[in-house]
Image (tube, helix red, strand yellow):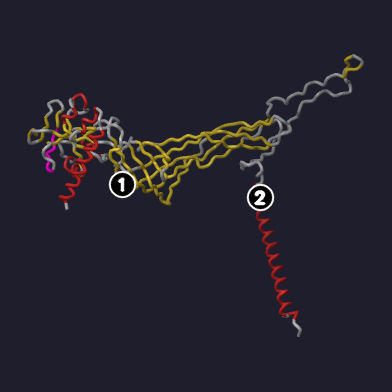
């Protein structure tokens, strides 16, 4: 059985590498020629990782342009790759110009099962071990980072940890009543609503890789693994207030910011692509993760004390025009001089919290609905009782029962 599994894995690796070579036609595809897929990563790490290992300080090649080479020690401490390849050293050309390290992890090309890992020197192009120099062709260890992740089939737990963060001020505005005929003044106020989403994923997920979160077949979020997703939207709230004529009120839009921590289980799809961008390999795994979402849970308007619209004195009406009589301008001596418009001091504060103007007394609607339900319920019961009595009387009369009996 073990031999059959080994043959199956070897066949899959050969087929995978052949497919990559067949679909890659540009200059970078030469790296993958005659490459071998490492299908037992746990066994490899157990051999090269250790406190006394002499291989920890040497490098591991990276086949992704977005990621630089890293050391074996970093590979051992962060198991964030699922594809490791053994690539002939000759495919890289002059590693002294291309690579980031002077030494890389390698092994002999002829021994697959019991390889002796060595340190490949990019200058001398030789691979040395504690027992000497390895002869023959040399294979360098390279890692292929995922192209993207897909998070699907999210199932959230019922438990949610909510934390109140504070009450940020979102906007300022001013209500002004310049006309004596106006009683209520309303205004739409725009403010920015920020949302921050962070997915806490297992350590095997590589940070910096694009992550798509799906709800069903629809992509809801497109972010980067290990980074916080920021969303900013404009929203509008209506401020309405009873105001005396020629008065002004400063208003403030205040929000309530909360942070929700929810755990979930999901399917993580890891997608690898070749140098031309075609789908190369996909792996599916079940993960336990969590999401932290910070957003505005509630927004309301706070009103300051109303003040006079005119700081010093009310506006003065223009003087009355003189009467014209017989072509001569004469002043109406009996008419009193013009008086300014007196502003009534504002002492009444009515706070309407409902956005709908018609619901100035929202409790009245509930009382009215309850009274209507009670009235029609009693009316319905009375009608049903009358119908029941009529039917019973007709039946008693037909059968000569009760008061309709002949005896």
- Count of number-bearing discs: 2
Q: Position of residue 308 (x, y in %)?
A: 68, 30
On screen, residue 164 versus residue 50, left or right, reads: right
The answer to whether residue 263 of the structure is visible from this angle is: no
The residue to which callout 2 is attached is: 365
Q: Is residue 107 magenta?
A: no
Q: Nearer the viewer, residue 217 or 54?
A: 217
Name the dominant secondary structure of the magenta segment: loop
Q: Residue at x 21, y 30 (%)?
A: 30
- The structure residue drawn at horizontal position 16% and vertical position 42%, both measured from the top left corner, is 47
Q: Is residue 68 above or below residue 43?
A: above
Quick one: which residue is furthest to the top in this view?
Answer: 328
Nearest the viewer among 109 and 401 is 401
The quarter in which the C terminus is drawn is bottom right
**Helix, strand or loop at mark 2:** helix
Q: Position of residue 263 (x, y in %)?
A: 39, 47
Left or right of residue 282: residue 186: right
Q: Quadrant of residue 355?
A: top right
Magenta stretch, residue numbers:
113-119
Q: Position of residue 213 (x, y in %)?
A: 39, 41
Q: Which residue is mark 1?
A: 285
Name the residue at the right extreme: 326
């Amino acid at each position: 059985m073990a031999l059959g599994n080994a043959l199956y894995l070897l066949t899959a690796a050969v087929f995978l590498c052949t497919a990559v070579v067949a679909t890659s036609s540009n200059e970078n595809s030469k790296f993958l020629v005659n490459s071998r897929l490492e299908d037992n990563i746990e066994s490899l790490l157990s051999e090269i990782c250790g406190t006394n290992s002499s291989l920890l300080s040497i490098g591991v090649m990276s086949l992704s342009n977005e990621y630089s080479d890293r050391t074996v020690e970093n590979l051992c401490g962060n198991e964030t790759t699922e594809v490791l390849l053994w690539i002939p050293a000759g495919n890289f050309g002059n590693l002294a110009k291309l690579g980031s390290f002077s030494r890389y992890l390698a092994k002999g090309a002829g021994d697959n099962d019991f390889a002796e890992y060595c340190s490949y020197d990019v200058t001398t192009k030789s691979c040395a071990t504690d027992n000497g120099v390895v002869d023959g062709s040399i294979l360098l260890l390279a890692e292929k980072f995922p192209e993207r992740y897909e998070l699907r089939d999210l199932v959230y737990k019922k438990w949610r940890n909510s934390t109140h963060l504070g009450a940020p001020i979102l906007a300022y505005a001013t209500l002004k009543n310049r006309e004596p005929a106006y009683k209520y003044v309303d205004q739409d106020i725009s403010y920015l609503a920020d949302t921050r989403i962070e997915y806490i994923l297992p350590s095997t997920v590589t940070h910096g890789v694009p992550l798509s979160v799906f709800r069903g077949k629809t992509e809801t979020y497109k972010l980067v693994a290990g980074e916080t997703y920021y969303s900013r939207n404009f929203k509008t709230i209506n401020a309405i207030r009873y105001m005396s004529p020629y008065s002004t009120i400063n208003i403030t839009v205040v929000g309530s910011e909360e942070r929700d921590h929810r755990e979930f289980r999901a399917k993580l799809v890891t997608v690898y692509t070749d140098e031309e961008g075609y789908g190369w390999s996909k792996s599916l795994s079940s993960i336990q993760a969590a999401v932290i979402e910070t957003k505005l849970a509630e927004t309301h308007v706070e009103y300051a004390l109303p003040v006079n619209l005119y700081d010093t004195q009310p506006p003065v009406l223009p003087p009355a025009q003189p009467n014209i009589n017989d072509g001569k301008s004469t002043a109406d001596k009996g008419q009193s001089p013009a008086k300014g418009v007196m502003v009534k001091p504002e002492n009444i504060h009515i706070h309407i919290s409902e956005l709908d103007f018609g619901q100035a007394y929202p409790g009245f609607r509930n009382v009215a609905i309850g009274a209507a339900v009670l009235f029609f319920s009693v009316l319905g019961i009375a009608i049903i009782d009358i119908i029941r009595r009529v039917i019973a009387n007709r039946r008693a009369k037909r059968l000569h029962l009760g008061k309709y009996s002949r005896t």
